[in-house]
Image (cartoon, helix red, strand yellow):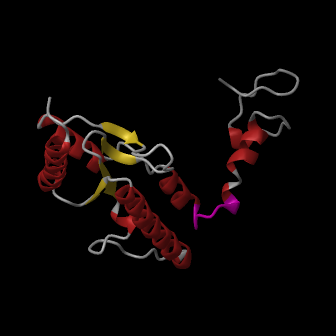
Amino acid sequence: MSPTSASGANCSASFDGCAEDHLGCNGYLAYMGDSSQSWASTPAVRASMRANRSRDTRPELLLRRELHAKGYRYRVASRPLPDLRRTADLVFSRAKVAVFVDGCFWHGCPIHHRLAKRNREYWEQKVQRNRRRDSEVDARLAEAGWLSVRIWEHEDVASAALRVSQAVDSRRRAVRSTSPQN
């Protein structure tokens, strides 16, 4: 659907090529911000960063496929706790296991993380904030009786799936042994 001007005329120009003053094109630019005033060092970097996905990444899909093939069922991109403003990549509700597939760049992998060459200070602070948030989320989940499993994106899928399945099975056994028998 193309944007419309205040007069109701359709705007066939691209968003950044429209000279009309209406909410369609100019409103979009005002909302999105001018790319020349972006936090990114170049328009190419901005495009690359905007293309990064928050869910359904390749490592996450591979892990989900492996676990599903082993018969495990889980929620995807779900909040483990209703009042926690973070989503886990996989959630095993009954076993109280939350799985996070962390990207090496975004979460500062000790093996693969390399500091950015441009905007170095910004990215150092960003990764530190992510690490701090990850620790806080893990602590909040632990307080609520949950187990956080963190998987690096570079980890072997089979070994990551094994770690997750062992954690889920262990928690399921613990829940069964403490529940009253009829």
How far across and down, in percent of the image, does residue 149 sit?
27, 56
Residue at x 87%, y 27% (from the top left corner): 6
Q: In terms of image quadrants, where is residue 102? A: bottom left
Residue 42 or 132: which is nearer the viewer?
132
Residue 152 visible from this viewpoint = no
Number of marks in picture? 0
Please indicate whether residue 85 sits to the left or right of residue 28 in the image.
left
40 inside magenta stretch: yes
Q: Give the range drawn in magenta.
A: 36-42
Depth check: give the residue in front, 152 or 35.
152
Percent of width and height locating residue 95: 24, 43
Residue shown at 66%/56% (left/top)?
A: 35
Is residue 37 toward the left or the right of residue 105 in the image? right
Q: Residue furthest right?
A: 7
Position of the N terminus by quadrant: top right
From the viewer's perspective, is residue 54 above or below residue 102? Answer: above
Counting from the top left corner in percent of width and height, residue 140 is at 42, 59
Q: Is residue 32 left or right of residue 169?
A: right
State the image quarter where residue 176 is shown: top left
Quadrant in the picture for the C terminus: top left
Q: Main secondary structure of the magenta part?
A: loop
Q: In this view, does 68 lie above or below 167?
A: above
Question: Residue at (31%, 40%) from the top-left corner?
Answer: 93
Q: Which residue lies furthest to the top in this view?
A: 8
Q: Can residue 89 be seen in this view?
A: yes
Image coordinates for residue 178, horizontal then vertical, percent? 18, 45
